[in-house]
Amino acid sequence: MDQTSGPRPADGRRVVIVTGAAGGIGTAITARLLADGFTVAAVDVNAEGLERLERRHGDASLTTFSFDLTTEAERCVGYIASMLGDLYGLVNNAAVIHIGDALATSDDDWSHVLASNLTAPFQLSRAILPHLLARGAGVIVNLASIGGVIGLRERAAYCAAKAGVLGLTRAMAADHGGSGVRINAVNPGTTETPMVKTVIDSSGDPAATREIWSSRQPVGRMGQPEEIAAAVAFLVGDHSGYMSGSTVTVDGGFSVV
């Protein structure tokens, strides 16, 4: 089956919004969905990163949009719909991380992590759902984390937010699965992204930290953004047509040991 063989508007496009598109996993997701024939609305607060994305994938199937999703989530969806027309899907990938246990997490830290990692995906999903329900078909894929399932040290706010993403995924799937809208999640493990590199480089011993983070996966390495993107593309595409409310874990086995 063609990855883009489901219901389409008259012009044949299926428009998918990808948030956090200028970052490591988001860039890989954007590239993979473009390769699979989707039209991608790439969203990020990083305007320079979006310009790099345009230079790398400069064709009519990619349009970039700069929004701060902690304050403009619903405006973002409405604007993209007005620019590109019928919407088919949403990949909630944008996220931030905070290093610290509960004692080292201020109210401002907590609010910022939940606003970015949980509230924005909720608001984006709420805004796009009327478009998908009117169409009678569509997909939402939420990027959660193994931190939403198991406890990670010094990630109190992050783990709480990602656990919320998984709960939101299941609840929305239960509410809207009968209307042709599939809602699933991906749980990435440790992946070599700019965000992870920043955390490693800011540690006391980056080389030792990298070795520890690589060896804690049974496969003996960190994941690559393209490996996460492959799972997202599967859930966006038609081959996962019988999946809703599911979570695909891509973590090199970290969460099972």
Image (spheres, rainbow, N blue to C red):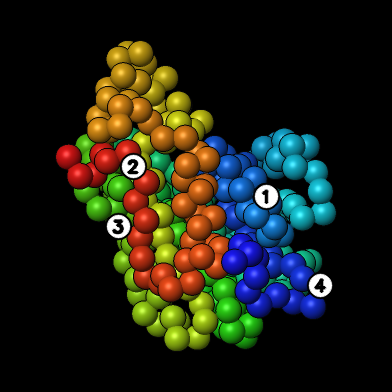
Q: Nearer the viewer, residue 234 or 19?
A: 234
**123 or 180, which lies in front?**
180
C-alpha gap between disc 1 and disc 4: 18 Å
Q: Residue at x 32, y 38 (%)?
A: 252
Mark in front: 2 vs 3: 2
Q: Which mark is residue 11?
A: 4
Tell me which residue sits at (45%, 86%) in the image. 178
Mark 2 element type: loop
Q: Rounded to the nearest whole Å, what is the CA distance between mark 3 and mark 4? A: 38 Å
Query: Is disc 3 surrounded by few (<14), some (14 to 19) or many (20+) residues within 10 Å?
Result: many
Q: Label 4 to label 2, Cα distance in Å? A: 38 Å
- N-terminal of the pair, mark 4 or mark 2, is 4
Labelled disc at residue 251: 2
Q: Secondary structure at mark 4?
A: loop
Q: Amino acid at mark 1?
A: Ala
Say which label, 2 or 3, has the lower sequence index: 3
Quarter of the figure with the N terminus: bottom right
Q: Is residue 143 visible?
A: yes
Residue 66 horizontal/vertical position (percent): 69, 50
Marks 1/3: CA–CA distance: 31 Å
